[in-house]
Structure formats: C-alpha cells, structure tokens
Amino acid sequence: MKLGFLGPRGKRPGLLGRFALSGPKTAPAKLPWTLAVASGKGGTGKTVLASNLATQLCMDGFKVAFFDADLGVANAHLLLGVQAQRSIAQVLGGKISLKEAALPSPFGPWIVPGGSGISDLASLSAHEFLRLARDFRAWEEGMDFLILDCAAGISVQTILFLQAADDLLVVTNPDFTAMTDAYALIKVLHMRDPGMRVHVVVNRIRYRGQEREVFERIQAVCSRFLGKELNFLGGLPDDDEVPRSVGARVPFVVGAPRSGAACALRGIKDKILDLRPGGEGEPGLRPEGYGDRLARALRG
Ligand SMILES: Nc1ncnc2c1ncn2[C@@H]1O[C@H](COP(=O)(O)OP(=O)(O)OP(=O)(O)O)[C@@H](O)[C@H]1O
Ligand SMILES: [Mg+2]
C-alpha cells in the first residue's frame, strides 16, 4: 500500500461549519455538494444507484459531475452509455486534465471514466493523488452535485476518497454479510470523522418494509458501538428492470421510468434534495471544493 502516510484526522466541523472553513485558497465559488456512494461488500448496487441518481438529478435540471472512483475496474461509464475514449489513466499520466477527460453522458451527467483492468490505479502514489486533488477544482466548479462511485471495502485509497466527500451514502442489501460489512465501513469512517453524515439505502428488497428492518439492524449496532445516528434514505426493490437496464446501457430512470426501481429511486432523490445544504435558493457559494478537501485528507 503506497498511501501509508495517511494520518488520523482531527474532528471535522459539522456540515454548516464546513461551509465556513477558514483559509480558502481562492474566493468562494459555486462548488458542488459531494455525495460518495460506498459499500463494505462488493456488488450491493452502488454503480446502479449512483448512475441512476446522477441521471435523475440531471433530468431535474441539475448539473452533475460523476467520478468513477473505482479506479482500476471501472464500469460506471458503461451504465451511463459512454464509450470511454479517455479515462483517469491519461489524467494520472499527466496527458490531460480531469476536465478534459470528462465526457458527457447521453443521459446528462459528465463522467470521468475510471480505468479498466489497470491494477496500478488501485493504489495511487501520494504524488498522483495530490495531482488528482488539485485537478478537481477546475472540473467541479459550476456543478451542483459531484457523485463519486467508490470501490467496495475499506482500502486506504477508498477511505481517502470517502472522507473528503460532504456526505456518505452507504448501499447495502439484506444479506447478513452486506450488513456487517456496511457497519465495518461506517465504523472506519466514523473513527476518522465522527461528524460525517451517513445515509443508508437498502437495495434489492423483496417485501414491503424490509428496507426499514435492514436499516434498523444496522442503526442498532451503530448506536450501540459507535453512538452514531444514521439517516435512512429508503430502499430499492429487487427488480428485473435493473439488470435489463445494465445490459441495455440505459439508466432505468430513463428506460423504465415507471418501474418499481425508478419510482423508489425518485423517492430517494427527493429525500437527498431535502437534505441539500441551504435548500432551495442557496447560491451554493463555498470556500472549499472536493479537490481541496481531498488534498487536505492526503496531508492527514
Ligand atoms: N435493485 C436491483 N434489482 C435487481 N438487480 C440488481 C439491483 N441492484 C443491482 N442489481 C444487479 O447487481 C449487479 C451489480 O450492481 P452494481 O454493479 O451496481 O454493484 P456495485 O456495488 O457497484 O458492485 P462493485 O462493488 O463490484 O462495484 C447489477 O449489474 C445488477 O444486475
Ligand atoms: Mg460498482
């Protein structure tokens, strides 16, 4: 692991406090609200959720940047119908900037594809990470949302991407191992930043009310061992339209807008909009962007 310098981080201010962090390097600018979509266990539905959420937010008129932070084995661009001529590999090679690597999805979000089968990208050097962090500013400025589709698990690299986000959106399913791994991820993030807001989506639910049961089980463990309150965003049903949409490379909110998955996704999106810092009418001016926070997280 190349990122062994990662030190413990100090207590982070609450959400509003983070807007007023002192010492911005540049004047306040319109910078996005960053949501990192993560899970402890692989295959819980992060990419499906993140790509459909980003698409639905674009359909609602927001400007959305999508970053595939599963750098080595990226696939989000496929779900967003994008042919990746450029990827993060060229950015890290110093050939193009992050903004130049961003491609418009036919469904709205701007996406920087990750690499495919490039194992080096799974453990960036500190130098590469810092260059990436510095590059974010030019790309994210003017966006309403930055959505990160993260790799599963608690690798040092993944934790860095997550802890620089404004909010963490954990995707689990009802499987016991997915729930316990969700708790493990939340625990690691909580240790680094007790103030971080953690939202939970329960994917692949099979009966009404199952999402609430799963959430309550994870919440009970988090309350008992971490004293941490989570925010429940809802569930997505196990729905055949989901694998169909993946195969067709068309997000289900576009290709099957009346499906159970699409209806549930819109409910989750509405809850996210309600939580948006500042709410309606907020100009969105902030002193720090995701790139600034990523650079700070790197310094430890
Ligand atoms: N609600 C759902 N109903 C039915 N199938 C689903 C649902 N959500 C996800 N799937 C299936 O699970 C597969 C894996 O989903 P996805 O790629 O989003 O998981 P992931 O968490 O991003 O995986 P990884 O950890 O490998 O990045 C999808 O291709 C799809 O076939
Ligand atoms: Mg994925």
Image (cartoon, rainbow, N blue to C red):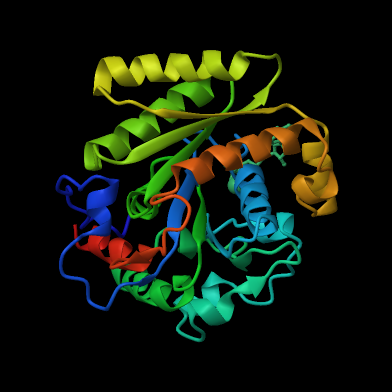
Residue 66 point in image, percent of width and height: 56, 61
Residue 113 point in image, percent of width and height: 60, 66
- Name the quadrant of the N terminus: bottom left
Q: Does residue 175 appear anywhere in the picture?
A: no
Horizontally, residue 238 falls left or right of residue 153, namely right
Residue 203 image-quadrant placement: top right
Furthest-bottom residue in view? 95
From this view, report whether residue 236 is shown above or below residue 192.
Answer: above
Q: Residue at image x 62%, y 54%? A: 57
Give whichever of 32, 77 is nearer the camera: 32
From this view, report whether residue 76 is shown above or below residue 65.
Answer: above
The total of numbered circles placed on residues is 0
Q: Residue at image x 58%, y 65%? A: 63
Give whichever of 118, 75 is nearer the camera: 75
From this view, report whether residue 107 is shown above or below residue 42.
Answer: below
Furthest-front residue in view? 281
Q: Residue at image x 62%, y 13%? A: 209
Q: Does residue 30 appear anywhere in the picture?
A: yes
Residue 285 point in image, percent of width and height: 36, 67
Residue 118 image-quadrant placement: bottom right
Give whichever of 236, 98 is nearer the camera: 236
From this view, report whether residue 40 is shown above or below residue 147.
Answer: above
Residue 144 point in image, percent of width and height: 50, 62
- Name the quadrant of the C terminus: bottom left
Horizontally, residue 275 falls left or right of residue 107, namely left
